[in-house]
Amino acid sequence: MNHAISHDLFTRAIALMPGGVNSPVRAFKSVGGDPFFAARAEGAYLFDVDGNRYIDYIGSWGPMIAGHAHPAVIEAVTRVAADGLSFGVPNALEVTMAETITRLVPSCEMVRMVNSGTEATLSAIRLARGATGRNRMVKFEGCYHGHGDSFLVKAGSGALTLGVPDSPGVPKALADLTITLPYNDADAASALFADCGDEIAAVIVEPIAGNMNCVLPNPGYLEHLRMLCTRHGTVLIFDEVMTGFRVALGGAQARYGITPDLSTFGKIIGGGMPVGAYGGRRDLMAQIAPSGPIYQAGTLSGNPVAMAAGLATLELIQAPGFYESLEAKTNRLCDGLEAAARDAGVAVSTNRSCAMYGLFFGAEKVSTFAQATSCDVAGFRRFFHAMLKRGVYFAPSAFEAGFISAAHSDADIDATIAAAREAFCMAA
Ligand SMILES: *Cc1c(COP(=O)(O)O)cnc(C)c1O
């Protein structure tokens, strides 16, 4: 595979942009080598500037659940863009978006649009603090909630990949207000709440953890968090920036039948445009400015072109059988990868939830952060490069979830498994 143009671009980029990228994980730091530069994408495929094609299991880190450059999404964006890119006054698509979200996710009685997942979680925490008059918050080791100061404490995703789960630049006084707990440890949560539950404004959790690879909640765990929060007047925030509209139409909260007080969204909700949202109980959301005193704003929030991309995507995912089909594809892929690894004598395990999955280099079924981080990173790295060479793009980190889109055909998945048969031998 020739990468001359990508290599040249990266050489120019690295002189002018930190690490040559605008978001850390893109730099391939944890797997080594240079990233490739995209020229275009279509369906399940990414095409780089050197003309190579990759079957893509990242989907822009989540948004592209309908496949890249879906004609319905591109048509909506093009049509709406022709009428102007931004107005700074309300537009009708914002109302349709609010109606759509509140219908698909009933715990969201009201919603506010923002421009990223980071903005959504930052705003939700401010709301929880403002509404409860408390300062402390709880997050879980290996969970990632964007790059807000309060969240860069034992964070997942790029922070974990690059070994900087606690970032310089976060004032200690603020970090001290963030309490971290081990994910899936109900007793640890009980003990903390017994100690200081009445001082905790919010618990924020990825209901399915997708930023330390993919880790599912133990049976009863989310119910336990719900119970503790209810008992102590703590706001339970489900960060569904990744899981929202991915693990089910109504997100993880629908899958597990839990009603959080607030939810945060991003990724799929923008269909590839920069969009986030937070929503939840009416009595909480009504405290946001201008209907209440808790301030949050955004010049481009509810942008018409972004709303058009998001709405077109949310339309596509409501097709009958959409999630059943995604789940079958994920199972086909994960079963195939497990079988290929077994035949190559490589120990792997997988976790799956509908259109997201995790592949772990290690025999153990993974349900904790400690297990996720003790997998064979060097083995993954060799596997990643062997797959890339064969035209399959998995996340360039052992600590990221993988994503399936509606555009992945059985033939794409079978080609991926065939590549993996060779790649596992190189990883062994
Ligand atoms: C991606 C992600 C975020 C951050 O969203 P950005 O749009 O990158 O700011 C927050 N929470 C979770 C669970 C995510 O996966």
Image (tube, rainbow, N blue to C red):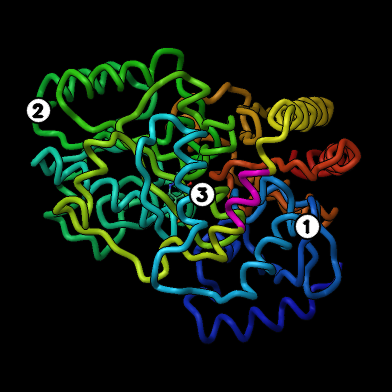
Amino acid residing under circle 2: Asp
Boundaries of the magenta span: 309-315
Nearer to the camera, 92 or 243: 92
Residue located at (51% from left, 71% from top): 22
Q: Is residue 11 above or below residue 97?
A: below
Q: Is residue 191 visible?
A: yes
Task: Count the marks.
Answer: 3
Examine the rendered structure and indicate whether residue 74 appears above or below residue 232. below
- Residues at marks 2 and 1, CA–CA distance in whole angstroms: 51 Å
Q: Which mark is residue 71?
A: 1
Residue, disc 2:
198
**Residue 250 within the magenta-colored segment of the rendering:** no
**Of all residues shown, which one is farthest toward the top?**
220
Amino acid bearing label 1 = Pro
User: What residue is shown with label 3?
Assistant: 96
Q: Look at the picture and state if 103 lies above or below 174.
A: above
Could you tell me which secondary element the residue under label 1 belongs to?
A: helix
* Residue 407 in the image, given as x and y percentages of width and height: 79, 45
Label 3 packing within 10 angstroms: few (<14), some (14-19), many (20+): few
Residue in the picture at 36% in, 16% down: 223
